[in-house]
Image (cartoon, helix red, strand yellow):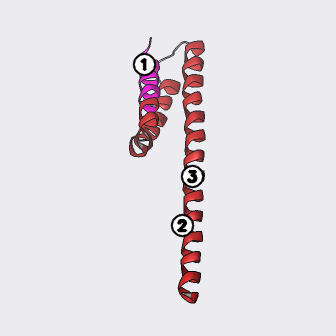
């Protein structure tokens, strides 16, 4: 396996681990590094195109999981903020008539 393909695998595995831990800082850093790894794979030494396609599709699947998780997290935060806003409104009404 070429060095570029190995780095794609390592980056994918690190992203999976960071996602499992919900380590958003690590995910951000890995995302930036992922771009460099993909550029290296596409522009440097010739690699097996089928293997590269397989590795990139595997990486894409991780990004799809990441998107699903972040969308769920964002929705949970939105719902929590809505509950806080409703509680604050109820508290203001209570103090007005209390």
Could you say which quadrant of the image residue 21 lies in? top left
Vertical placement of 21 versus 92: above or below?
Answer: above
Which of discs 2 and 3 lies nearer the camera? The answer is 2
Q: CA distance from mark 1 to mark 2?
A: 46 Å
Q: Residue at x 50, y 30 (%)?
A: 38
Q: Residue at x 59, y 45 (%)?
A: 72
Whole-percent x and y of residue 67? 59, 40
Q: Nearer the viewer, residue 25 or 94?
A: 94
Rendered-image quadrant of the C terminus:
bottom right
Q: Main secondary structure of the magenta part?
A: helix
Q: Nearer the viewer, residue 4 or 96?
A: 96
Vertical placement of 29 versus 12: above or below?
Answer: below
Please give the label number shown on residue 33: none
Q: CA distance from mark 2 to mark 3?
A: 12 Å
Residue with the mark numbered 1: 6
Q: CA distance from mark 1 to mark 3?
A: 36 Å
Please give the label number shown on residue 76: 3
Which of discs 1 and 3 lies nearer the camera? The answer is 3
In primary-sequence order, the first of circles 2 and 3 is 3
Residue with the mark numbered 2: 84
Whole-percent x and y of residue 80? 55, 59
Which of discs 1 and 2 lies nearer the camera? The answer is 2
Q: Residue furthest front?
A: 98
SS of the residue under disc 2:
helix
Q: Nearer the viewer, residue 33 or 66?
A: 66
Asked if residue 36 shows in the view, the reply is no
SS of the residue under disc 3:
helix
Q: Residues within 10 Å of mark 2 (few under 14, many from 20)?
A: few
Whole-percent x and y of residue 6? 42, 18
């Amino acid at each position: 396996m070429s060095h570029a393909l190995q780095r794609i695998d390592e980056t994918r595995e690190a992203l999976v681990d960071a996602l499992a831990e919900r380590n958003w800082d690590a995910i951000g850093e890995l995302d930036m590094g992922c771009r460099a790894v993909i550029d290296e794979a596409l522009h440097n030494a010739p690699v097996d195109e089928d293997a590269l396609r397989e590795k990139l599709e595997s990486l894409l699947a991780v990004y799809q999981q990441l998107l699903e998780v972040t969308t769920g997290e964002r929705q949970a935060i939105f719902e929590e903020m809505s509950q806080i806003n409703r509680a604050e409104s109820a508290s203001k009404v209570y103090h007005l008539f209390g």
